[in-house]
Amino acid sequence: MSTTANEVETIWREADCLWTEQQIERAIEAVAQTIETDLADKDPLVLVVMKGGMIFGARLVMRLRFPLELDYIHATRYGLETQGAELHWKVLPQHPLEGRHVLVVDDILDEGETLCKILQSCRQQQPASLRCTVLVDKVHERKYQPDFKADYTCLEVPDRFVFGYGMDYKGYLRNADGIFAVKGL
Ligand code: IMP
Ligand code: MG
């Protein structure tokens, strides 16, 4: 095994489980029911933010029992350390957003700069409505827009480094079947 894989194995073994798969699935089901009320008759376009949103996106859409289109987007910020860095699209939405009811699906609202910029960029295409959902909201006072909340949040996590259910630690552990916090972080 590579050094990183070895390190990651230890990280996983020693991590604190914050939410179990069962708890997460219950929270996703509750959010899915609210989304169904809001979007079931709106032929929505669901945009999953890669890579973190992929597992939450998959689990969520299978609980949405109405017609929808599913697409993915991939965006990063250049110069992550500086606020105000430009959004760089690795993969743009393949569907035109104009006039569509759009739901953006992401893994975590940490500081929220990337998600806020993704939403700003989507808004420029004049969707009929634009909503976002996150699996977890990290509780702290460093939000990019202090009053910003996702329209639908499944769970909260404390201000620690978390992984699992799509969220990575050094590119690994997205496959962990719960939400875990790295010991000491
Ligand atoms: P933000 O702009 O600070 O909200 O975070 C941008 C992205 O960084 C998120 O969509 C995640 O993919 C990733 N990220 C932020 N915090 C964590 C974490 O605690 N664990 C894993 N990934 C994270
Ligand atoms: Mg992300």
Image (cartoon, rainbow, N blue to C red):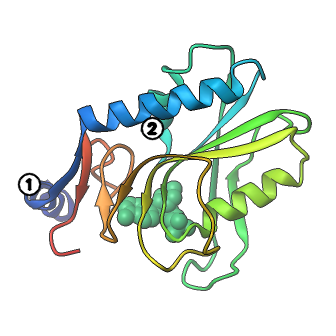
From the viewer's side, name the closer residue of 18 and 96: 18
Q: Of callouts 1 and 2, which one flags the residue occurring earlier in the amino acid sequence?
A: 1
Residue at position x 41%, y 64% in the image: 138
Q: Amino acid at mark 1?
A: Arg
Q: For the residues marked 1 and 2, what is the alpha-carbon distance in whole angstroms?
A: 23 Å
The quarter of the rendered structure image containing the C terminus is bottom left
Q: Where residue 49 appears, x then y in whole percent?
A: 58, 47
Residue 44: image location, x then y, percent: 74, 27
- For residue 16, side relative to residue 105 (left or right): left
The residue identified by callout 2 is 56
User: What kind of element bears circle 2?
Assistant: helix
Residue 107 percent location from the top left of the image: 47, 50
**What residue is at 38 percent from the left and 36 percent from the top?**
27
Dot 1: what SS? helix
Q: Left of 181 or right of it: where is 58?
A: right
Looking at the image, residue 141 lies above or below residue 20: below
Amino acid residing under circle 2: Phe
Instruction: Name the residue beneath numbered marker 1.
Output: 13
